[in-house]
Amino acid sequence: MNIAESVPKMVWFSSAATHDHILLGKLKLSSNTINVLDKHHNNHKTFNEFSKTNTGFVTRIKYNTVYDIAQENIIDERIHCGDEKTKLLS
């Protein structure tokens, strides 16, 4: 999805039986991209490839995942989120 537009740039539809790794192979890894992955996707090899190329990704982690916080970023509550009320506060 281009941040300046309100429609997705690319969407792939597949059957529920199609595994994510088949579609992930088609991605062009770029530091200008944020990939949103299915909540059940848990492939550390893929996450490592994203990290090596500075490609952004968002997914939910499994409840039993062990991790360390490397850096904590504070985000202002008034940051633009598309909400009309928030826009008025900015």
Image: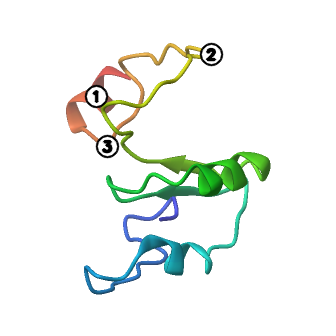
Q: Quadrant of residue 24?
A: bottom right
* Disc 2: which residue: 71
Q: Quadrant of the C terminus?
A: top left
Secondary structure of the residue carrying numbered label 3: loop
Secondary structure of the residue carrying numbered label 2: loop
Q: Nearer the viewer, residue 6 or 51?
A: 51
Query: In the rendered view, would you say 62 is above or below 5?
Result: above
Kindly give the residue lying farthest to the right in the view shown.
52
Cα–Cα span, label 3 and label 1: 7 Å
Q: Position of residue 75 (x, y in %)?
A: 47, 18
Cα–Cα span, label 2 and label 1: 26 Å
Q: Residue at x 21, y 30 (%)?
A: 85
Q: Dot 1 surroundings within 10 Å: few (below 14), some, or many (20 or more)?
A: few
Q: Dot 3 surroundings within 10 Å: few (below 14), some, or many (20 or more)?
A: few
* Disc 1: which residue: 86
Q: Nearer the viewer, residue 21 or 36?
A: 21
Amino acid on which the number 1 mark rests in the picture: Thr
Query: In the rendered view, would you say 65 is above or below 22?
Result: above
Please state which of the two labelled residues, at mark 3 or mark 2, is closer to the viewer. 2
Q: Quadrant of residue 77?
A: top left
Q: Residue at x 33, y 86 (%)?
A: 14
* Disc 3: which residue: 82
Amino acid on which the number 2 mark rests in the picture: Gln
Amino acid on which the number 3 mark rests in the picture: Gly
